[in-house]
Amino acid sequence: MDTFNTMRTFRRIVELGGLAKAAEDLGMSSAGLSKQLRALEAHLGVVLIQRTTRKMSLTEVGLGYYADCCRLLDELDSLEKSVKQQSQRISGRLRVNAPLSFALSVLSPLLARFLKQYPEVTLDLAMEDRLVDAVAHGFDVSIRLRASLDDSTLVARRLASLTQVLCAAPAYLDSRGRPATAGDLQRHGMLAYSLAHAAGIAQDDDADAPAYALPAGAHTQVNNSLMLRDLLVAGLGIGALPSFLAHPAIAAGQLERVLPALAAPARHVYAVYPTNRHLQPKVRAFIDFLAEHLPAAMPADS
């Protein structure tokens, strides 16, 4: 027996004053409703309603049972309403993982806007350039900058795109010369990002051309793009920076683009999360917010 539904049925019989009206209200036959009432009374071992051909009336036990039914069903309805409202509320602790350079350079102002827009969300941000296991570390969302994502049980949503820009300080290029071809890079000091997903560069106008690998003898490697930018600005060589770091430095005259006809494989900003099934409102709101605002926050390629 479905106890709660049977209690609701009994309540409607009492409130509407008879089987016929209750059956019509519930979309049932009077015979079917009468059968349910008899089954309930048999289950409880009491008579709840005295029935005659002309009228029905609650027994003393039935009156007490009706009152308790109303109280319990109202509490259940209140509980269900509260849970549904909570499930739609954008609140709670949001655990996010993102690359340090990207978080400091691009995400920082967006995160401030998001938290102002959703004041009931508390942010727990971990900045880490190395890839981490989002599930094992309990992250709701991981932001990844990759040319492509490996096969995974995680769900990924592409939020924006970026390029890798080969550049160097003007003073360095003045002293060492400006490369005219990719082969000229062999004669220069090369700085590299050690965690790069793809280190090759290829001709922009020939998508089928094999990627030209940056010289293997890079004399300096770092695992953080902000440090790489600072070393390039200091005039230590040529290296590839993500566009969100390269373009502001180029606009400020700190760096100069090298071999603009060469380009690294396209990279994208992804939001990666364990599942899109029963996605929590705070997670959906965060991803939607980034999808809306992140492209405008990324420096335009030039």
Image (cartoon, rainbow, N blue to C red):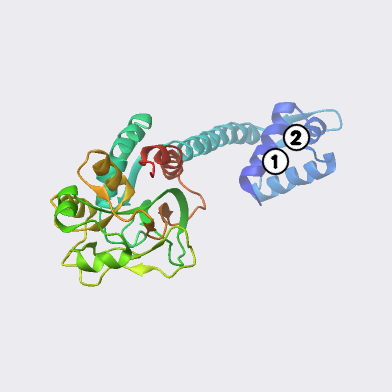
**Mark 2 lies on residue:** 50
The image quarter containing residue 148 is bottom left
Residue 199 % position (x, y): 32, 65
**Mark 1 lies on residue:** 47
Residue 43 % position (x, y): 66, 50
Name the amino acid, label 1.
Answer: Val
Viewer-closest of 170 and 136: 170
Vertical comparison of 3 with 17: above or below: below
Vertical comparison of 167 with 16: above or below: below
Query: Is residue 273 left or right of 80 when viewed as pictured?
Result: left
Residue 150 % position (x, y): 43, 66
Disc 2 secondary structure class: strand
Viewer-closest of 94 and 88: 94
Residue 176 % position (x, y): 16, 58
Q: Residues within 10 Å of mark 2 (few under 14, many from 20)?
A: few
- On the question of residue 54 being in view, the answer is yes
Disc 1 secondary structure class: loop
The image quarter containing residue 118 is top left
The extreme right residue here reads 53
Question: Cα distance, mark 1 to mark 2?
Answer: 7 Å
Q: Going 76% across and 36% down the picture, which residue do you hit?
A: 26
Name the amino acid, label 2.
Answer: Gln
Query: Is residue 88 left or right of 121 when viewed as pictured?
Result: right
- On the question of residue 48 being in view, the answer is no
**Quarter of the picture holding the C terminus:** top left
